[in-house]
Amino acid sequence: MEMMVGVHSATLRRRGLLRSLRALLARGGVSELWAGNGTNLMRVVPFRAVNFCTFDMLKRALDSGLLGSQADTIGLGSDGGDGPHASRFLAGAGAGVVATLVCFPLDTVRTLLLSQAGGARLGPLALAATAQEVVCAHGVGRLYRGIKPAMISQAPSSALFYGTYDLLKTNTLRRRSASDADEEPMLTAAESLLFGGMAGMVSEACCFPLEVLRRRMQVSGGKVGVTALVRGILREGGLRSLYGGVLPAVLQVIPNAAMGYFTYERTLYWISHRRTAD
């Protein structure tokens, strides 16, 4: 639903979110809401893996080197297990850029699949078939068309996502460590889910216009310049066109971001304690 609104924002915005939802249900039932989910997972899984892995490596490098001297004045510092807030924003931006470079072809193919009329070819096998068709017809470079706006979108989006989460986490753990110095401070499951959802909401809402521009460039195949594309979007409905579909996007990203960061935090906690036990 969120992806369709991003690609066909003008039409679906006129219909409204609820009417578009009813149209999807009428066309194929509840299963229609999960159409193309296999294709989506083939893109999301490697993207999230590269994103979180790169973020963790950059965060450690920045905490111990470039920004490590500021840890005591900006964040909790090495004693608290958290580095400066600035390192989270920088590491987040870097992680978004690296993940985009690695996984952008998957996102291009997914966007092309979901923009096809009726979505008749949605499915995991369609990903490879469509990629092969694109490469044979236009070359490998076609898979990377629109990567510049994608990187411009992902850098601030990832920076806000990781940075916002870190601000919420750091402030919470600082208060907790001050009240209970005997135990290692840790977020509860509810706090991790809440902060992840809030970080995703802030990131998506602030950077959504860049995401709209990125998807339009992918669908156009790079044939339309950025300036002409922005003018076309504005002609559709003014500045509101840049936020067409922001509601379903935010509603989708809140549970997505919440579960993503919760899983990341719990996995790191499990790995660190298992190493300690061994």
Image (cartoon, grey):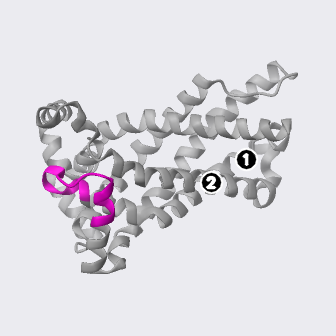
The local secondary structure at tag 1 comes to loop
Q: Is residue 186 above or below residue 217?
A: above
The reply to whether dot 1 and dot 2 touch (C-beta < 8 Å) is no
The type of residue carrying mark 2 is Cys
- Examine the image and state in which quarter residue 139 appears: bottom left
Nearer mark to the viewer, of 1 and 2: 2
Q: Position of residue 100 (x, y in %)?
A: 47, 62
Q: Residue at x 21, y 63 (%)?
A: 231
Q: Is residue 237 above or below residue 218?
A: above
Q: Position of residue 223 (x, y in %)?
A: 23, 74
Q: Let me know if residue 155 is in the magenta part.
A: no
Q: Is residue 96 visible?
A: yes
Q: Which residue is mark 1?
A: 84
State the residue lying farthest toward the top.
179
Residue count near mark 1 (Cα–Cα under 10 Å), binned few <14, some 14–19, many ≥20: many
The answer to whether residue 49 is left or right of residue 186 is left
- Highlighted magenta segment, given as a residue range: 113-129
| The C terminus, quarter of image | top right
Q: Is residue 215 visible?
A: no
Q: Residue at x 65, y 49 (%)?
A: 88
Q: Let me know if residue 115 is in the magenta part.
A: yes
Q: Position of residue 168 (x, y in %)?
A: 62, 33
The local secondary structure at tag 2 comes to helix
The type of residue carrying mark 1 is Pro
| The N terminus, quarter of image | top left
Residue count near mark 2 (Cα–Cα under 10 Å), binned few <14, some 14–19, many ≥20: some
The answer to whether residue 261 is left or right of residue 247 is right
Mark sitting on residue 53: 2
Q: Residue at x 79, y 47 (%)?
A: 71
- Examine the image and state in which quarter residue 138 appears: bottom left
